[in-house]
Image (cartoon, grey):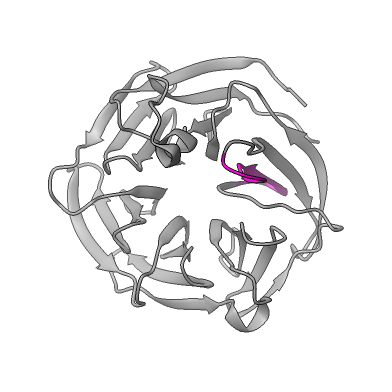
Amino acid sequence: MLYGRPVARYSLPGDNVFPEGITEGGGTVFFVGSMGDGTIYRGDTASGHVEVFLPPDGDGRTTITGLALDGYGRLIACDYDGGQLFVYDLAARKLVARRALPAEESWPNDVVVAGDSAYVSDTRHPRVWRLPVGRDGVGDAELAVDLGPFRPADPAYLNGIVAHPDGSVLLIASQGEGGTLWRADLANHTAAPVDLGGYEFNADGMLLDGEVLYGVTNRGGDIENVRFMISVARLAPGWRSAAIVAELADPDWDCPTTIAKVNGQLLIVCSQVRAMHTKTPPRLPFEIASTDLPNWT
């Protein structure tokens, strides 16, 4: 299903970007991270301009995936290969904290902020970590939920993550066998699959917009025959079940990894990660695609 009209395409400077994560930065601003060299970019949908915001300048960033802003003007970035989280003061463009996940070979993939907590999915282990991000500073990462006791033996490969506005529940996408969407209750540290009527959500990045959940799919078959689309689900009260309302696709999306809602637009990260895996030249420039945000009411 093709939908909407393309609004714009935002070009990212550089020939080794392979963008992966994106987050809304307030108003018309967005931030994008590079898997290629760890650069973090700042873009503006009003001007159409994208600039290098934090260059890979030796602070340890290697492979940036998930990004999120906390409530105190700080940007949280997941360093997938480095197994650590970076926190930057946006106004000063300065590193204020670097925290390793407290498990061997952790792969922090995506992050969402709820109140004074940032929750991070771990692709290496079936776990979600909590990073305290309060007014007084950034704490140490700690375990929030271990999905191990609740999941089958197949690899969890946790990826996209969103949080309920009241901070009580998380939804975490697994790109393992079956493409499970997990509901995690933070109060009792339990988790269970969301009932999607047998649908394999299989999401990479996710976006929560009210009661509508978007999930980006870039898996299926071998690396040369991957299906690219966005699954759209309407969540039932309590988030224990959801109904799929659409599957969105566009032939110009080149291996989308995640999405963000910025100033009424849906921004889609065209990562070209297939070219990175197959070591073939990417198509330049790397881009963020956008379209009008559909109305599902």
**Residue 61 as seen in the image, left or right of residue 113:** left
Number of callouts = 0
From this viewpoint, is residue 136 visible? no
**Residue 279 as seen in the image, left or right of residue 249:** left
What is the quadrant of the N terminus in the image? top right
What is the quadrant of the C terminus in the image? top right
Q: Is residue 8 magenta?
A: no
Which of the pair 290/270 is nearer the observer? Answer: 270
Q: Residue 195 is drawn in which quadrant?
A: bottom right
Residue 180 is situated, as x and y percent measured from the top left of the image, at 70, 62
Q: Residue at x 60, y 16 (%)?
A: 6
**Residue 45 as seen in the image, left or right of residue 38:** right
Residue 186 is situated, as x and y percent measured from the top left of the image, at 58, 76
Q: 174 above or below 101?
A: above
Q: 137 above or below 77?
A: below
From this viewpoint, is residue 229 visible? yes
Which of the pair 91/254 is nearer the observer? Answer: 254
Q: Residue at x 63, y 61 (%)?
A: 176
Residue 234 is situated, as x and y percent measured from the top left of the image, at 78, 48
Residue 216 is situated, as x and y percent measured from the top left of the image, at 62, 42
Task: Specify the segment rendered in magenta.
Answer: 207-223
The residue positioned farthest toward the right in the image shown: 197
Q: Residue at x 81, y 57 (%)?
A: 196
Q: Residue 22 is drawn in which quadrant?
A: top left
The residue positioned farthest toward the left in the image shown: 58
